[in-house]
Image (cartoon, grey):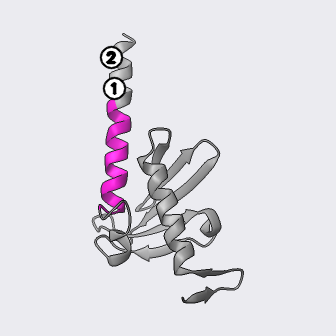
Amino acid sequence: MTVYKSDNMEWTDKDEQITVQKVSEMIASPKSNIQKHRDTFCDVYDITMGEEKAKIINIKTEENQSGSWKIFAGKFEQQGIGPFVDNSEFDKNFSNGKGIRHSINNKIAAQLALKTHTQGINR
C-alpha cells in the first residue's frame, strides 16, 4: 500500500477510496441535497446530508471545456482528492462505474423533478 505525504497530512489509496465511496453514497441518498454555483469557469457543487458536507469542483480553464474534478470531504476537506477527469480509472470507481458527472447530473435532475412535483401539489 502506498502512503502519500503532504506538508500537513498523510494518506493512502484506501483513504481516498473510502472518501469517494462516502461522497458517492451521499449523492445517491434521497436525504442529501446538492447546490450548484459558479466560480469563474468552475462549477462548484455543495453536497449536504444532515451534518455531513462535501464539495466537488469541476475545474475549468476555459468555459467550453469539460475540465477536471476535485473532491473535498472528510480527511480531504482542505486539500481535496484529484484532480481527475471524466472516464479516468479514478472516475470509474465513482458510483459503480457511472462516474461523477453522471451521478451529479442525475441527482440534480431528481431534485428538480421533486421540486416541480411538490410545487404542482401545493397549487
How far apart marks 2 and 1 lie (CA) works out to: 6 Å
The residue segment tinted magenta is 98-113
Q: Is residue 37 visible?
A: no
Looking at the picture, does residue 117 appear above or below residue 11? above
Magenta segment, principal secondary structure?
helix
Q: Which label is found at residue 116?
A: 1
* Residue drawn 38% across the image and 28% down it: 115
The image quarter containing residue 15 is: bottom right
Mark 1: give few (<14), some (14-19) or many (20+) Cα within 10 Å: few
The image quarter containing residue 24 is: bottom left
Residue tagged 2: 120
The foreground one among 77 and 58 is 77
* Residue drawn 33% across the image and 62% down it: 96
Looking at the picture, does residue 104 appear above or below residue 19? above
Q: Which quadrant does the N terminus fall into?
A: bottom right
Image coords of residue 94 (percent x, y):
38, 64
* Residue drawn 52% across the image and 51% down it: 46
Looking at the picture, does residue 5 appear above or below residue 69? below
Image coords of residue 38 (percent x, y):
45, 54
Assess whether residue 114 is covered by the magenta stretch.
Answer: no
Q: Is residue 117 left or right of residue 4?
A: left
Q: Which label is found at residue 80?
A: none
The foreground one among 37 and 96 is 96
Q: Are marks 2 and 1 in contact (CB under 8 Å)?
A: yes
Image coords of residue 58 (percent x, y):
41, 64
Mark 2: give few (<14), some (14-19) or many (20+) Cα within 10 Å: few
Q: Secondary structure at mark 2?
A: helix
Three-letter code for the amino acid on which mark 1 is drawn: Thr
The foreground one among 65 and 115 is 115
Q: Is residue 121 visible?
A: yes
Q: Is residue 56 left or right of residue 123?
A: right
Assess whether residue 110 is covered by the magenta stretch.
Answer: yes
